[in-house]
Amino acid sequence: MLIEASVAAGSLKPWKMPLILFGLVGWAAWGYFLVRIAVLQRRLRLNPALAAAINDEWVKEIRRISYAIGFWTIMIFQGLLVAVASFVTFPALVAAQVTLAVGVVSASVAFLILGRERGNG
């Protein structure tokens, strides 16, 4: 309702609507997976053997590498944004949200690729 009123009044720029929708979808997914992680944590506390099997050394190493890939992706992306900002102006909100999205997606994809079965690779 507030968003529609802002668009009608002309105070909401056209590029903001996709970012708002992207943020709302991300918030809903975050909330859903937060509940799932809480349930999984409870199960792991009740079953230490399962916890040890899930968090073995291979998974820890994949997680570490994935975080590093996400970090370096953000650093490179920020460098590219600085270079692009020399020629084009864009809002800082767009830069911040896109940077966060690039970092999260790159770390998640890296984890999924590195975490495939070792023999399927």
Image: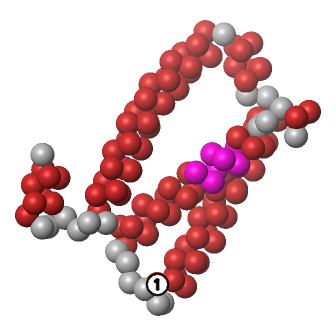
**Quarter occupied by residue 59:** top right
Q: Is residue 83 left or right of residue 68?
A: left
Q: Which residue is mark 1?
A: 85
Q: Position of residue 87 (x, y in %)?
A: 47, 90
What span is in magenta?
Answer: 105-111
Main SS of residues in magenta: helix
Residue at the extreme right of the image, as rendered: 119
Amino acid identity at mark 1: Ala
Secondary structure beneath label 1: helix
Residue drawn at x 43%, y 36% as measured from the top left:
29
Quarter that holds the C terminus = top right
Is 38 drawn above or below residue 59 in the view shown? above
Q: Is residue 90 left or right of residue 13?
A: right
Q: Is residue 94 left or right of residue 43?
A: left
Residue drawn at x 78%, y 43% as measured from the top left:
114
Q: Position of residue 54 (x, y in %)?
A: 73, 24
Figure disc tally: 1
Q: Position of residue 74 (x, y in %)?
A: 59, 64
Q: How is the image coloured?
A: secondary structure
In the foreground, 68 or 1: 1
Q: Position of residue 90 (x, y in %)?
A: 37, 78
In the foreground, 97 or 67: 97
